[in-house]
Amino acid sequence: MRCLGWLALLTVAATALGVQQAQAQVPPQDYRGVQLRKLDTERDLLLAMADSMPESLYRDKVTPEQRDFAHQLHHVASVVAFVCVRFFGADGSAVPDTVGIFDSRQGLKGYVNGVYDLASRALQNQSEEDRQATASLFGQDMPKWQIWDEIHMHTMWTAGQVVANFRKHGMPPPAFRFF
């Protein structure tokens, strides 16, 4: 038990140190381009997942506790939209409506495309001064350029969870792609 306490303390300290180091870093000159490619990769992955899953299984869950397939993809995209509006000044009225996205491939893909169009514009229009400004993302202070990387990590983690939906029905998930 004592070991677990020390491990938890070290984890918290390492996390705090990592955030401090990120704050002190300035991204490379072309890093915005890398982040735009990550957004494109995320969009392509979510669209490939929506295309690969039969619409009849959009509301299917692997376990009772998890979100169904369509709600999981919605969650991924909705977090991107939330962060863009909250931290990067994106127009909240430009976030697509969710009517019809949970049972329709066309609706789900339209939502994903709309959110990622919004995110791409927000990243392209973000000033260098704003990229260096500090913000608190879920209690962690970091430079705003790093928030884009946190969005990417959340997207890949959360989207990866629907691989189980494909496996449940004996289907392969969309192929892995490098960005």
Image: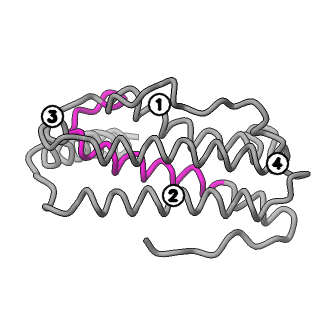
Instruction: Identify the residue at image location x=71%, y=45%.
Output: 108
- The quadrant of the rendering that contains the C terminus is bottom left
Q: Secondary structure at mark 2?
A: helix
Image x and y of residue 8, in percent: 33, 41
Disc 2 + disc 1, Cβ < 8 Å: no
Image x and y of residue 83, in percent: 41, 33
- The quadrant of the rendering that contains the N terminus is top left
The residue tagged 3 is: 133
Which image quadrant for residue 59? top right
Q: Amino acid at mark 4?
A: Tyr
Q: Secondary structure at mark 4?
A: loop
Give the CA distance from mark 4 to mark 2.
19 Å
Give the CA distance from mark 2 to mark 1.
16 Å
Residue 42, disc? 2
Instruction: Identify the residue at image location x=76%, y=49%.
Output: 106
Disc 1 + disc 3, Cβ < 8 Å: no
Give the CA distance from mark 4 to mark 1.
23 Å
From which residue to which does the magenta span run? 137-161
Q: Secondary structure at mark 3?
A: loop
Q: Secondary structure at mark 1?
A: helix
Residue 58, disc? 4
Instruction: Identify the residue at image location x=83%, y=62%.
Output: 168
Give the CA distance from mark 2 to mark 3.
25 Å
| Residue 136 inside the magenta-drawn segment | no
Q: Earlier in the sequence, mark 4 or mark 2?
A: 2
Mark 3 is surrounded, within 10 Å at the Cα level, by few (under 14), some (14 to 19) or many (20 or more) other residues, namely few
Magenta stretch: helix, strand or loop mostly? helix
